Image (tube, grey):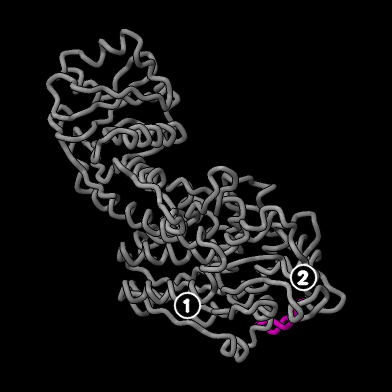
Amino acid sequence: MEFSIKPGSPDKQRSGCIVVGVFEGGKLSAAAQALDKAAKHYLSDIIARGDMSGKAATTLLLHNVPNTQSERVLLLGLGKGTEFDAKRFLEAIRAALRAVQATGARDAVLYLNEIPVAQRDNSWCMTQAVLAAHETTYRFDRLKSKPEKNIHGLNKIQFGLIDGKQAASLKTVLAQAEAIAQGMKLAKDLGNLPGNICTPSYLAAQAQTLAKTHKSIKTTVLEEKDMHKLGMGSLLSVTRGSHEPAKLITLEYRGGNKKQKPIVLVGKGITFDSGGISLKPGADMDEMKYDMCGAASVLGTLQAVAEMGLPVNVVGIIPTCENMPSGTATKPGDVVTSMSGQTIEILNTDAEGRLILCDALTFAGKFEPDTVVDIATLTGACVIALGHVASGLFSNQDGLARELLAAGEQVHDRAWQLPLWDDYQSLLDSNFADMQNIGGRAGGTITAACFLSRFTKDYRWAHLDIAGTAWKSGKEKGATGRPVPLLAQYLINRAQSGK
């Protein structure tokens, strides 16, 4: 998909389709008014006859509109002007894109950026339009013997601006949005691949390919023997039941000055999670290929950062392996020693994500980080708590939590902060080791974060539990690419602040 900004009046635009807005009651947006004036009230006459109500996310396709250069005009219902907020904008833009894609138009001009959206600006609208365009055109059919052919493929979108004063500043926003969208696509593609293809070795190869494509990225892959030398007994306990070798992947992006401490992103990379000896139920177990979406989001974010050329230093760390049952698999009750020297009693082998993350978080300390953020499809309890709308957020510094929450709100990839109080820590007490890897049914998302917090006392740290947001189930099953937008926006903000 190609994107650009096109200043000028809508009646002068040569395009396969022009999209303009109509509010309930027949009120036309500024672009629709300009088009209606050129067409001698053609649009307002149609609305007066009742063909377009302006109801939210409805569309009406017109051909041969007088005195216009476009092949088609799409009227897009925006609902009530007083209620036109972020949610309704997103519903409208998706409806418009679906309607345009159903036509033979190969290019379109969207005049939606200048429609006032409550508490949002033009930059937000443009970013969301780009992300929505990629979302509605995304297909994962590479594994089908006969992929569906897209006969009419919309391949070019222009953002029309009646007032072109903002065009220059919006070009940067557009470039950043495209980079984020491409990062999301990489994360989706990796998440949607099955476990027999997307193995730990495959993820390592993808990280190495990323380094070859972007010279600003350096990739290092540690093997199991290297992890043994580092004392990563917790991570290695998870991979014991699998024939697939574990990998510890490090990607270093150096866009800032040499003295600038890096921001470290740590992504959980369980490429398939059977639960191990604590075997999961068979129903929907296929979705456990998505247990590496934290790792996928780190790769997607690093790609976006490299494409944007942000002046920051970022390190991505991906601990990756399978969690499988076998005669050599870790058993409930086993005690292992983590890289930090702390011992862990493993009461449930299906609580494996925290076991690989804790060693990766200790490893992150070697980079003397400014900030560490880990991303993991960690607990089903988070899905129960927050559903599929918001990611769970924990942090040992409220200032960092606020920065991440603000970035999520900014790009509409939202998170919600949950408590990380010491009151919960005692639930991890063990009779036989320094801690146990589960804290019981109550507050499962919180006790998982409390477990990780024991390995992050030397730096600013946040944890994102994306179990409810990394993929969709049911008819629309597939990876979402979240939280690449949140992470990318956080890094953009850090680059702009100069911190």
Query: Is residue 174 at all visible to an observer of this figure?
Result: yes
Cβ atoms at labels 1 and 2 below 8 Å apart: no
Which of 241/76 is in front?
A: 241
Where is mark 1, residue-wise?
Answer: 250
Which of 397/20 is in front?
A: 20
- Residue most toward the front? 145
Mark 1: few/some/many CA within 10 Å (<14, 14-19, 20+): many
Q: Which amino acid does label 2 sit on?
A: Ile
Mark 2: few/some/many CA within 10 Å (<14, 14-19, 20+): some
Is residue 342 in the magenta section?
A: yes
Residue 156 horizontal side relative to residue 259, left or right: left
Q: How far apart are marks 1 and 2 (CA)?
A: 29 Å
Is residue 301 in the magenta section?
A: no
User: Where is residue 252, by image quadrant?
Assistant: bottom left
Q: What stretch is highlighted in magenta?
A: 336-344
User: Where is residue 343, by image quadrant?
Assistant: bottom right
At which x and y percent is residue 109?
A: 23, 36
Which of 304/343 is in front?
A: 304
114 versus 450 height, above or below: above
Mark 1, mark 2: which one is toward the viewer?
Answer: 2
- Residue most toward the top? 49
At which x and y percent is residue 41?
A: 20, 13
Q: Earlier in the sequence, mark 1 or mark 2?
A: 1
Where is mark 2, residue-wise?
Answer: 277
Residue 440 horizontal side relative to residue 372, left or right: right
Instruction: Identify the element where label 1 is drawn.
Output: strand
At which x and y percent is residue 86?
A: 44, 36
